[in-house]
Image: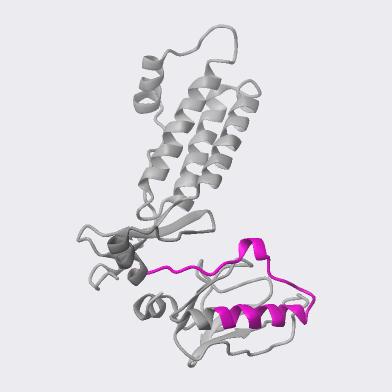
Amino acid sequence: MGKTEIQETGKTWTKSTKVSWRRIQTRAGLICSLGNGLRFCRLNNGSCMSREAHVQFCEGLAGQFRWSTLLIVCFECEEDAKGFGERLRQRLGKFGLKVSEEKSRIIEFGRKVWQRSKETGEKVSTFNFLGFTYYGDKTRKGTFKVGRKTNSKKMSAKLKAMNQWLKSIRNAIEFKEWWPILKQKLIGHYRYYGISGNMKGLRIFYSQSVRLAYKWINRRSQKKSFNWEKYRRLIYEWNPLPQPKIYHLTYTLSSKRKCY
């Protein structure tokens, strides 16, 4: 990543920071930025790494995405990234822990590699994090932005779970009782995956869920309950299902600033 992208992610967080969805709370401790680089700040939360330690692993610009045991760290220089990986493995080894090599990798990502790919035709690397696939996208003006969409594996798993639930519930309780639950499930999906740029993923989940509901409504008995036209009136007029909605407007927050 370049300087601009790293500065955007490398914001300072302290122990006094109010709890929110951006809190850098992890099972092993707290990761925060201090001074010239990033340091590990271990908190006493009952884990095997309970004592406090400060380890500076980069002299230059660096930033991190702060979530649980899944960690994404970005660097300006490839040498810093490799050096951090080596020191992290050594540090974890002292506590009998190790990094999953199958899930760990170093990739080029950001504005510069995206611009270079447009000239050379090479494919920009993507990565998955917390149910999303992150990729190089462009704004309406043609400049670089970080694109996010629902991870394909997560999408398949969610639709499979929806199918199993509809199958199990169709005759267990009355239709008027489980239909509101279906609405809540859709809204819950939108509230998590409803992030700027992911409307296509929300619409796919909605349309597939609608078709699955139609399938299992008509398998409650040997007699078909709805034809497609009657079912469309149900979901759009009589008892409509919630439509896809973006809840997290990540791009509009910085609309007055230059998008890199």
Magenta includes 151? no
Percent x, y of residue 160: 59, 35
Q: Residue at x 41, y 43 (%)?
A: 202
Numbered label tally: 0
Q: Of 148 and 84, which appears nearest the observer?
A: 84
Percent x, y of residue 4: 34, 78
Q: Residue at x 53, y 70 (%)?
A: 106
Residue 251 in view, yes or no: no
Residue 171 in view, yes or no: yes
Magenta includes 98? yes
Where is 62 relative to 249, above or below?
Answer: below
What segment carries the magenta color? 82-110
Seen as rendered, the residue at the extreme top is 223
186 lies left or right of 219: left
Q: Of 5 and 210, which appears nearest the observer?
A: 5
Q: Residue at x 50, y 50 (%)?
A: 151
Percent x, y of residue 219: 57, 15
- Figure colour scheme: one colour
